[in-house]
Amino acid sequence: MEKNDFLKNFADQFDETDTDELTMETEFHELEEWDSLIALAVLNMISKKYGKTVTFDEMRACDTVEDLFNVVESK
């Protein structure tokens, strides 16, 4: 699993956020567009693209995109 691919797939879940602004250090919970629907879309993307199951609580415990990447990679 590559970080750049994960970041692109993560960014693809947003409609209004400028995806060029997203980095692995982005604190995604702080994004204006972030809400429960985006969270579900991200969890679905992780399941479909990476075959991994991340719980909502595990995602909520992450601060940055890289934290979430590390959770997915550890499974």
Image: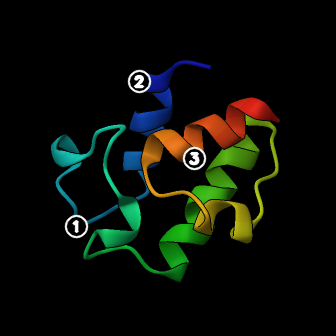
- Label 3 vs label 2, nearer the camera: 3
Q: Secondary structure at mark 1?
A: loop
Percent from the top left, x then y, of residue 38? 49, 70
The residue lying at 17 percent from left, 54 percent from top is: 18
Q: Is residue 1 left or right of residue 31?
A: right
- Label 1 vs label 2, nearer the camera: 2
Question: How far apart, in angstroms, are the residues tagged by discs 3 and 1?
Answer: 21 Å
Q: Is residue 47 left or right of residue 23?
A: right
- Res 54 → quadrant: bottom right
Question: How far apart, in angstroms, are the residues tagged by discs 3 and 2?
Answer: 13 Å
Q: Secondary structure at mark 3?
A: helix
Query: Which numbered circle lies on residue 4?
Result: 2
70 to 62, vertically: above or below:
above
Assign the C terminus to one quadrant of the image.
Answer: top right
Residue corresponding to mark 1: 16
Q: Tell me the amino acid under the disc marked 2.
A: Asn
Assign the N terminus to one quadrant of the image.
Answer: top right
Q: Please tell me which of labels 3 and 1 falls first in the chain.
A: 1
Would residue 64 be visible to someone looking at this image? Answer: yes
Residue corresponding to mark 3: 68
Q: Tell me the amino acid under the disc marked 1.
A: Glu
Q: Is residue 34 left or right of residue 6?
A: left
